[in-house]
Amino acid sequence: MTQTFTDATLLRPALYVVATPIGNLGDISQRAIETLKSVDLIAAEDTRHSARLMQHFAIGTRLISYHEHSGSAREDAILKALADGKAVALISDAGTPLISDPGYGLVVRVRAGSYPVLPVPGASAITAAISAAGLPSDRFSFEGFPPHKAAGRRQMYEALADDQRTLVFYESPHRISESLADMAQAFGAERQAVICRELTKTWETIHGDSLGGLCEWLHQDDNNRRGEFVVVVHGAASVAKSALSAEAERTLKILMRDLPLKQAAALAADITGYKKNALYKRALELGDDTQP
């Protein structure tokens, strides 16, 4: 479905995806306030949390809950409101809805029903962090929250170790230390990164260092591990095929004859001093060429 709606007047029926502040209430847009006041219904991730925002801006529109555990019945109710010709706003607890927040399923169903879905843009922790981190911003990949369990988290980081784009992660205060330690292991302790903590709030902190340095910084003060985190990591340096010396490649080929690729790359890294990820990438390129 193609949308061409740009008029400031609210459409009915329509779903408005409205960004709200991530901390500082002054970051809400005038359009967002007017939209929230004018719609017939607001679907909020946490009605108790959003009620404070509504009170601050004297918004009296009725709130209903819509969160990750909401069943299809709640989506049915929102679709019924649209079918009745109403305008509905979707908001999350903070920032832009659907960015590591609920809403994807609802938007899919609303668009499938041929109702307009209109963005009301505003604050986002991702763009706030990228804008101030001082790392390359021409290409970046938002990876959301890493897995809670260590094994899944490490697997995720290892898969991203050679990605040359700037990487952006969300993380909780309960796992930030372990998560940064796993990043240092997978990406290398010397990889540059920036921790953005409590963005736009009273105790906003933006601190850049190597991943190894950031691990130490987190433990210098308990306050450094409190709040909501965005971690921005510099992308991997490009590795050309010719970056390996002839001797390093010969060592890798010999090990590949008798060992699985990952094990061969790890052992070759110990022998040659090259990074394991670079050797593993080259091992994938060599493939079966080393088999007798």
Image: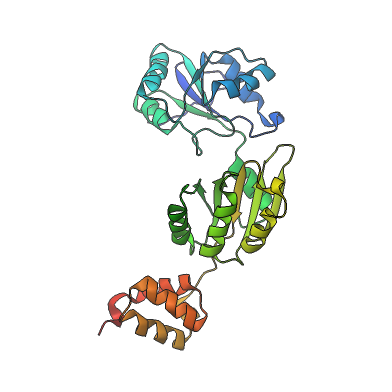
Percent from the top left, x then y, of residue 139?
54, 55
In the image, is 88 to the left or to the right of 189?
Answer: left
Please report the residue visible at 38 percent of the width from the left and 15 percent of the height from the top.
Answer: 80
Q: Of 53 and 89, which appears nearest the observer?
A: 53
User: Where 245 sits versus 1, above or below?
Assistant: below
Q: Of 196 and 174, which appears nearest the observer?
A: 174
Q: Residue furthest right?
A: 202
Please report the residue visible at 57 percent of the width from the left and 62 percent of the height from the top.
Answer: 184
User: Where 270 sits versus 222, above or below?
Assistant: below
Percent from the top left, x then y, of residue 133?
66, 52
Percent from the top left, x then y, of residue 269?
47, 78
Please report the residue visible at 42 percent of the width from the left and 14 percent of the height from the top.
Answer: 81
User: Where 260 sits versus 204, above or below?
Assistant: below
Query: Quarter of the image containing the N terminus?
Result: top left
Work out whether residue 243 can be spotted. Answer: yes
Percent from the top left, x then y, of residue 24?
70, 32
Count of numbered badges drawn on the protein: 0
Q: Of 176 and 238, which appears nearest the observer?
A: 176
Query: Quarter of the image containing the C terminus?
Result: bottom left
**Quadrant position of residue 264:** bottom left
Work out whether residue 57 can be spotted. Answer: no
